[in-house]
Structure formats: structure tokens, C-alpha cells
Amino acid sequence: MQRPDLSMAMRGMVTLIIAAAAPAAHAAPERDATEAALDRCLELPANASTAGQVDCEQIAAKAYDRRMNLSYGTLMRRLPAKAAHQLQQSQRAWLVYRDGELSAQSSLYATRQGTMYVPMQADSAVTLTRDRARLLESYVRVMAIE
């Protein structure tokens, strides 16, 4: 009796895993609650003005900031000391990056004329905190895996 070719068996296994994962990969991702709330806020006729749009963006920014801080606190409590210290250093560096990026964004948008750039700048600012909040939330999910 011949031994089966292990590489053929492995290729078959990989093909099976990929085929099984394909439907999950194409499933619609869960909608971010803060993003959905921002979209609803921006769709309200009362928020059609520049000021209304900026108000919506500021509400979203605060919500993402709360989410980021909640996840950061959760991680700092759950991580071993060395990992917590590294996360703390990373968060401090990110805050410096964020402040520098906000300053650069402000300079960039100051070169533009027109009220349409005001909510665009507010959205750019929200994106920074949104991305960090989502990243820290993903770390919390990783820590929840047993």
C-alpha cells in the first residue's frame, strides 16, 4: 500500500477550509453603532446646515472617544503588567500622533475656502478616534478568547 502524498492531503484540507470560510468572508459586517447614529444624525433635515453636520460629527467623536477609553481601561485591567505598560506607551504615542494629525488637518483645511470643508474636517477628526477605538475594541475581543 502506498503512503498518501501529504502535500496533496494538506492542499485538500486548505481548499476545504477556504471553501467553508468563503460564506463568512462575504457576510455583511456588523454595522458600527456610532457610525449608524452619525448617519441618522446627518440625515435629519434639521442637521442639513454646516453647523448641524459639525454637531453630528462632534457627537460621534465623543462617542468614539468614550469607546476608546472604555476599551483602553478594560485592556489595562486585563493585561499582564508588561503588556499593559506597552499598551500605555502605545496609547501615549497615539495621542501625540493624533494631536499632530489634527494640527496638520487644520492647516490643510485652512487652505480651502467654503463651508463644505468645515464638516469634512470634522469627519477627518472623527476618523482618527474611530479607528483607534475600533482597534482597541478588537484587542478586547482578542483578550476574551479562551
Image (cartoon, rainbow, N blue to C red):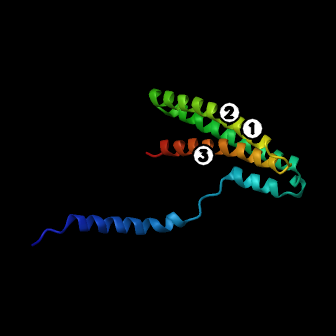
Q: Is residue 59 visible?
A: no
Query: What's the residue at 77%, 46% (across, down)?
Result: 57
Measured along the vertical axis of the image, is residue 128 above or below residue 77? Answer: below
Residue at (30% x, 69% y) in the render: 12
**In front: label 2 or label 3:** 2
Q: Position of residue 91 (x, y in %)?
A: 58, 32
Q: Residue at x 38, y 65 (%)?
A: 17
Label 1 or label 2, whichever lies nearer to me, is 1
Distance in Å between CA atoms under marks 1 and 3 = 26 Å
User: The C terminus appears in which quarter of the rendering?
Assistant: top left
Query: For the residue marked with disc 2, what is the amino acid?
Result: Asp
Residue in the image at 65% along x and 57% along y: 31
Q: Which residue is mark 1?
A: 107
Q: Residues within 10 Å of mark 2 (few under 14, many from 20)?
A: few
Mark 1 against mark 3, which lies toward the viewer?
A: 1
Which of the 4 image quarters holds residue 71?
top right
Residue 121, percent across and down?
A: 76, 45
Left or right position of 109 against 46: left
Residue at the limit of the structure toward the bottom, as seen here: 1
Mark 2 vs mark 3: which is more N-terminal? 2
Helix or strand or loop: what does disc 3 sit on? helix
What mark, if any, has residue 99 been given in the picture?
Answer: 2
- What's under tag 1, amino acid-wise? Ser
Residue assigned mark 3: 134
Element type where label 2 sits in the image: helix
